[in-house]
Image: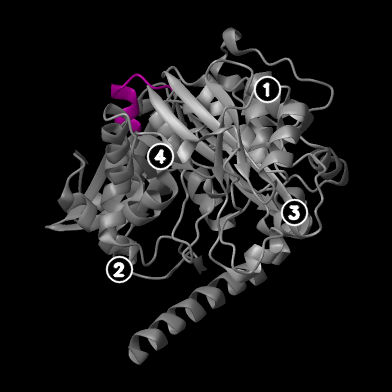
């Protein structure tokens, strides 16, 4: 049995908004964002296959509304009182508003004088006094030990706290947490973020493992960063999860090349349908590909062999990670733009390399030195070139062409008929390289699903797409030199700043 105590101190994910509501004594729960973080936790508990008893302690400013109560209407949950200032009044109000029989209470405390004023206490009152005749049981008096998930996640990190939590559960320890720190971290109070640990502990939300959310102006756009690897047909329950977690829009692609009738998409009239593309190569066999590419490209592949570039499939080892690290940190600028992996540590690169299990690394060695590599990710009916990179000092040896040729061989051996290499349309020189190696611009359909009123407004105003995708080529291409210059300048300023900080130390 997992026992959890949840202190719901504040009504909103925004601390400033919560402080304002408490200070002004506003107890309205009609806002869309009211108890949003608490609802996420309640939903996670309800979906968990584990045996759980969650004790929810609400203040006068966080009384559960209808949406929250619907999530708390099973044996996994118990509503309780988190005393703020007036125990009797708050107890009666909570029972009346929730129609629940309250058994337990805890006391909301604070050490800061300003916070005491905020909650309406006297300056010398860290906590509200509890009358001797108060009939509820004090949860603080329970015999079980308690451990703070908020604080331990901050102090020890994800992996350690998950391991600790397993021990706590076996020992019957009550795990305490505050919804405030579900996604946020506070260096001042040394708390959070607890979502990853809680998710693992409850064994839920595996369908959100590959979801990322980017902010476009004030709109949160969610996407599955494995959308090219697998077919997506979003369910109502899945979209509701995203909406509760703060996403305004969900976007995904239709993988028509897979011809999988089991994932036929029936779009709602509210979904926005747009055109996107990928650089795609259909593979029959190696010789067919070889005959398709031009004579110049074939000569480039031969040149790499003549220059003693050794191409092979390589296991994911520490030696490979070190070679990739040297390539990443060879130069901060590649193809006229800032290189995003410049400055990454060997530890980070090794961890990322070992995390991706379903992949193949193809390497190009010149003697003992890694001159270049390709990472192929194997998805559902498609292989994807996730990484292709080589040392700039060997740019005259056609390393990348040789790596592509070997990638075709690997796909043929694995009976994979489709190879994807990013998109076409945002980098002219790279686009030419893709086309010279047999990749074509393959049109695909992308959907944008508004999840909130803000999302609906954004799609109507055309704010759902990234700027580089929204602009027509006639405007975008002339702007690319300026964009590249800004990217290089930002990277050089970042490097200069780091050097200055290092000299000061």
Residue 257 found in image quarter: top right
Which of pointers 2 and 4 lies earlier in the amino acid sequence?
Answer: 4
Which of pointers 4 and 1 lies earlier in the amino acid sequence?
Answer: 1
The label on residue 218 is 3
Residue 270 found in image quarter: top right
Q: Quadrant of the C terminus?
A: bottom left
| Residue 170 visible in the shown view | yes
Percent x, y for residue 271? 79, 28
Mark-to-mark CA distance, 4 and 1: 30 Å
Query: Quick one: label 1, few (<14), some, or many (20+) residues within 10 Å?
Result: some
* Picture layout, residue 108 above or below residue 199: below
Mark-to-mark CA distance, 2 and 4: 44 Å
Of badges 1 and 2, nearer the viewer stands: 1
- In this view, the residue in front, 318 or 165, is 165
Q: Residue at x 35, y 32 (%)?
A: 408
Mark-to-mark CA distance, 2 and 3: 42 Å
- In this view, the residue in front, 126 or 281, is 126
Which of pointers 3 and 4 lies earlier in the amino acid sequence?
Answer: 4
Q: Are marks 4 and 1 in contact (CB under 8 Å)?
A: no
Percent x, y for residue 385? 42, 40
Q: Residue at x 66, y 65 (%)?
A: 122
Which of pointers 2 and 3 lies earlier in the amino acid sequence?
Answer: 3
Query: Quick one: label 3, few (<14), some, or many (20+) residues within 10 Å?
Result: few
The residue labelled by disc 4 is: 197
- In this view, the residue in front, 443 or 446, is 446
């Amino acid at each position: 049995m997992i026992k959890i105590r949840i202190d719901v101190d504040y009504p909103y994910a925004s601390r400033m908004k919560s402080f304002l509501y408490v200070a002004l004594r506003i107890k309205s729960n009609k806002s869309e964002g009211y108890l949003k973080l608490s609802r996420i936790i309640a939903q996670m508990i309800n979906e968990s296959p584990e045996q759980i008893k969650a004790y929810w302690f609400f203040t006068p400013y966080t009384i559960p509304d209808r949406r929250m109560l619907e999530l708390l209407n099973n044996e996994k949950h118990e509503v309780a009182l988190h005393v703020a200032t007036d125990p009797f009044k708050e107890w009666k109000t909570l029972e009346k508003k929730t129609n629940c029989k309250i058994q337990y209470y805890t006391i909301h405390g604070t050490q800061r004088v300003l916070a005491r004023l905020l909650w309406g206490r006297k300056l010398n009152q860290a906590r509200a006094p509890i009358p001797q005749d108060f009939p509820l049981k004090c949860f603080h008096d329970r015999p079980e030990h308690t451990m703070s998930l908020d604080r331990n996640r901050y102090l020890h990190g994800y992996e350690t706290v998950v391991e600790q939590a397993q021990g706590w559960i076996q020992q019957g320890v009550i795990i305490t947490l505050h919804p405030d720190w579900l996604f946020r971290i506070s260096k001042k109070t040394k708390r959070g973020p607890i979502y990853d640990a809680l998710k693992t502990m409850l064994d839920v939300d595996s369908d959100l493992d590959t979801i990322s959310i980017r902010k476009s102006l004030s709109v949160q756009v969610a996407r599955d960063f494995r959308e090219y690897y697998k077919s997506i047909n979003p369910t109502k329950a899945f979209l509701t999860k995203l909406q509760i977690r703060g996403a305004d829009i969900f976007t995904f692609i239709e993988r028509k090349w897979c011809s999988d009738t089991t994932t036929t998409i029936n779009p709602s009239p509210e979904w926005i349908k747009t055109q996107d593309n990928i650089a795609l190569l259909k593979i029959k066999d190696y010789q067919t590909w070889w005959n398709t590419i031009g004579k110049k490209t074939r000569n480039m592949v031969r040149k790499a062999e003549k220059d003693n570039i050794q191409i092979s499939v390589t296991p994911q080892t520490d030696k490979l990670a070190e070679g990739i690290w040297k390539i990443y940190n060879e130069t901060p600028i590649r193809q006229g733009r800032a290189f995003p992996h410049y400055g990454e540590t060997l530890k980070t690169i090794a961890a990322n390399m070992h995390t991706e299990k379903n992949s193949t690394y193809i390497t190009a060695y010149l003697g003992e030195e890694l001159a270049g590599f390709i990472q192929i990710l194997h998805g559902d009916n498609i292989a994807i070139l996730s990484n292709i990179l080589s040392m700039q000092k060997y740019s005259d040896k056609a390393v990348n062409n040789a790596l592509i040729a070997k990638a075709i061989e690997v796909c043929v051996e694995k009976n994979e008929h489709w190879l994807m290499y990013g998109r076409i349309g945002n980098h002219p020189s790279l686009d030419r390289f893709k086309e010279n190696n047999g990749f074509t611009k393959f049109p695909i359909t992308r959907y944008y699903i508004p999840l909130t009123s803000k999302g609906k407004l954004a799609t109507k105003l055309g704010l759902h797409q990234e700027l580089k995708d929204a602009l027509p080529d006639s405007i975008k291409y002339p702007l690319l030199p300026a964009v590249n210059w800004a990217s290089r300048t930002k990277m050089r300023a970042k490097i200069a700043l780091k050097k200055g900080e290092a000299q000061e130390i």
